[in-house]
Image (cartoon, coloured by chain):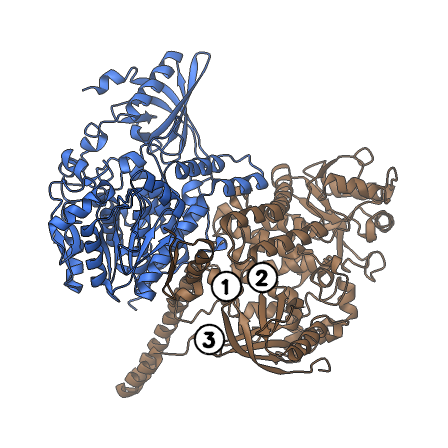
Amino acid sequence: MEHIRTTKVEQVKLLDRFSTSNKSLTGTLYLTATHLLFIDALQKETWILHHHIAAVEKLALTTSGCPLVIQCKNFRIVHFIVPRERDCHDIYNSLLQLSRQAKYEDLYAFSYNPKQNESERVQGWQLIDLAEEYRRMGVPNLNWQLSDANRDYKICETYPRDLYVPRIVSKPIIVGSSKFRSKGRFPVLSYYHQDKEAAICRCSQPLSGFSARCLEDEHMLQAISKANPSNRYMYVMDTRPKLNAMANRAAGKGYENEDNYSNIRFQFVGIENIHVMRSSLQKLLEVNGTKGLSMSDFFSGLESSGWLRHIKAVLDAAIFLAKAIVVESASVLVHCSDGWDRTSQVCSLGALLLDSYYRTIKGFMVLIEKDWISFGHKFSDRCGHLDGDPKEVSPVFTQFLECVWHLTEQFPQAFEYNEAFLLQIHEHVHSCQFGNFLGNCQKEREDLKLKEKTYSLWPFLLDDQEKYLNPFYSPNSQKFTVLEPNTVPFNFKFWRNMYHQFDRTMHPRQSVLKLIMNMNDQNKHLEKEIKELESKIKHQKNRQSDTILTKESLRSVHPDSPALKPSLCFKKEQILLPVNDAIRTIEGSNTADNRYSEYAEEFSKTEPAVVNLEYGVARMTC
Amino acid sequence: MEFSELIRTGRAEALLLPGPGQSPVRGTLCITSHHLLLSAGHGSPSDLWLLLRNVDAVEKRAAGNSGTITLKCKDLNVLQLEIEGLEETLDIAGSIEALSSLESVTTSYPFFYRPQSLKLGDAEDLHPPDHFYQQVALETNGWRLSTVNRDFYVCASYPTALVVPRGIGDEVLARSARFRQGGRFPVLCYYHSINGTVMLRSSQPLQGANRRRCAEDEELLKAALAQGGGRGLVLDTRSAQAVKQARITGGGTEAKAAYPGWKRLHRPLERGRPLQDSFVRLVEACTDPSLSMDRWLSRLDGCRWLTHVKEALTTACLAAQGMDREGVCILVHGAEGTDATLLVTSLTQLILDPKCRTLRGFQSLLEREWIQAGHPFQQRCAHSAYAQGRPKHEAPIFLLFLDCVWQLSRQFPLSLEFGEGMLLALFEHAYASPFGTFLCNSEKERYLCEVKTKTHSLWSSLNQSKERKRLCNPIYSPNPLALWPSVEPQSLQLWAGLFLRWTRPPEPAQEAWEQLWKIVTEKEVADPL
């Protein structure tokens, strides 16, 4: 609280971000320990979690006040005008402090209290059990075993304790191989395909330089291919562009030399690094934030940002991986530089294509826990949870979610979850409200005692899973066992609901999803009611009294909606799918929301022979 | 019959190469006067029945003793046939070329098509010309039905019955018509019953370089304004520069001084050659799966199709906003008043009027604002995106309209009674159809060719109950409000269902659609409980 000097400012204006005539709402701004809250004259609330703030900017003073622009990690951008510069300065300074914490212990998760008791909290953390997940895949088995080599994080700090390796690999091989791999991240199992007996393995780049070899590492790879009885050779996928990989050789790192490893097929797939991805997204957001954007600027911006090209590259790599396993029954070893960004993307997406379990709500949580959280994707660094190096921040996980979204668009029946689920996960990866995504690896999380001090996100999402169900999901369809997406460029589109999720005027005015969920809801409700009524009838018949029956049934015709039960993990502004609000209410049924009137104004500036409807002033040239 | 002379070889053995997600068909190919048939025998379901009118371009390639014919269709499908025998290949290609480009209307297929389920002339009462007037007359007494054009003498491209201000006599109309290109004097096309504002359409006034005026034309627009609230806006679908150009060749626009109460707004919309080029370039990009992401995006940008969609929608929204929110009467015209004008007036009605959003209401809108209003379908849809050679009068303005409607349906998925299937069907039938509905360029031509008595109507076919599932929107729920779409670039999408229909493997989206029907019909069963 020591950072907060002003808690309330009145007469603040919230500008419409895309309005060309500076349309605004006036209201009051409140600053709390965790949120910035704006309540406009119509009592509509806008909540912004401090941890969601990516950047705060104070612009030059104007006649109407001091502009304050806040950019959030969930792509919300708000533009306030604070009447007095002093207030603006106070809020600005407070937000700077509050949005950039220096210590993990100051993050929201450590103070967040959803009123659960201790045993519920502990159970919540036990919801996802990775040992159980490996058993589901069929490991340990004849060829793969659990290794205790990393039990104390001695071999690799950024790996989990429990690692699965080929049964024939001994501890010295593991130790040797880990010494030859960047950050000690030696090849381990990520996914095992039971039918094909093939495996997805992951690691970091070898420290091969120009000529170095490591017999243990060569043994390790051989053991992986031997662990697959159906195919002798294995693929080694380097997910980097070849040029980057070659440059790494000069630094004593690099990639596998095919001559030194028996039976490997080496392949580059060319996904760019975190810095390229960061600036690509930045460019995309810049273009899309332009007021009065033309179609042409939108497309050329989309093209020059390269964003969709990168998304396609990631998906193509995952498809290559899935094909190697399904078509050739070959095991695949995936790595990039450190093996925690591109490798996580490709391994998890590959598994998602192969295994329909990951397309269920629970399965998707497991997938994220396994390939992202446990294998040490550096969530805190990549999301900038703490005040740190901005060069470490990169939208790697956002890209993964976008790839999944593209798959849900191509296969509308193959996923149990819907877009809202992906958006909600994205929200909480950055919110620091739950412990799951804090820290950069399992060891760090254990040191922070997150399981004792914070809550897990997953049980809250499961409680709310009604909101995240895809009504088109057909789990029994044989067609969707292995997904074979088509990645010709015209299958890719801009993900408006992610990058403009708070710019409601850009969204469709009615939602099919909402309607169907509402229908399903009603149906369930009606069925429940029938049952209740039936049992009541039985009951009443026994008592031979009809007066009560009429009363009771009348009351149950308009019961409380089941969907209205407020959920604790949702902050107020996050009603992504307000299931119960009248489904046919039409957002944007007001022309003012659509800024057509501004077109008239705008054209009156650029073209002289234009009538301005509002003021009845016409300037004619002819 | 002249057809037999054009068919040089009627029969050959052929193989239809598979499109994405299809299997090849081998069988006997047969050319009739209006169709190409490929049958594997025994009435197999994969038989190909292609209306020759649907063929936009024929490409032939010979290799040894056989040849390949590529048929590029107006519905954007591309078919490849391998034919045995070199001579047969050339003959068949020649026959298709000749038969697919016959100009005569009365020998076209609709004059021969006699489906058993339909009766000739059963659509006559479906959209009677005075139906619109009767609707207006229920609301206001200020307008009358004029038959000044009963013999198509005053205006060749207008229908016989037109709605005009009550106080204006036929002789004034006839004089105003002489001051308008093609005789298209201002007529009522939409009455906004909420506030009594009106929408009129016309062609450009023949102002010319010396700024001629026409008292009767001024009187007509003054009377219209008096009925509609006193404030008017002329929405010219050309730029101010284009109007200047037009004045040199005798055209022009309404001078402010001559029409008190009317203001003017220029909203340039693309038409003619540039629009056709835009369509051709978009289809080129959509049929080239080898493009890189960057090339694809830059070609999507370069063809400017979605820019045209955005401009058309914005203009219609502006007109609708003027009427609904600002109480202004709107007169829309460009030059001829048969293309961009109709695009704007029909879209505006769809935005404002819930009646236009039902299956019947939409048909009636099309009948009134496109067919009877004299959009020259035969000229504009003579060729689609594949035809070689210089286009003469082709322009996909109707397709642009359908695309805008599709964009509306994406943003208001519950508010239109018809679905994407309806829009696709309209696109196909506008370019090649066994029905007479889209034949000819005007009511006059249709009258001369006796289209209404000698061909079947598309509407009666579409209104059969078996078509419901294909055409209707299962989640339609009537929406009394105006539909204000977002016209931001981020909100508009490429119409994949049309432009990528044949380049993508059969879509899982289709199955999702089926499932949507299932969910909704199950709900209907469950509802009475």
Q: Nearer the viewer, residue B150 or B33?
A: B150
Q: Residues within 10 Å of mark 3 (few under 14, many from 20)?
A: few
> Which SS class for mark 3?
helix
Tag 1: residue type? Ser
Q: Residue tagged by mark 2?
A: A362
Dot 1 corresponds to which residue? A19
Rendered image: mark on residue A564 = 3
**Residue under the image location 13 percent in, 37 percent down:** B453
Query: Residue A321: in sight, yes or no?
Result: yes
Q: Which chain hosts label 1?
A: A
**Which one is closest to the eye, mark 3 or mark 2?**
3
Q: Earlier in the sequence, mark 1 or mark 2?
A: 1
Q: Colour of chain A?
A: brown
**Going by the image, does B264 lie left or right of A399?**
left
Same chain, marks 3 and 2? yes
Above or below, comparing residue A384 to residue A538 in the picture: above
Q: In this figure, what is the number of numbered marks?
A: 3
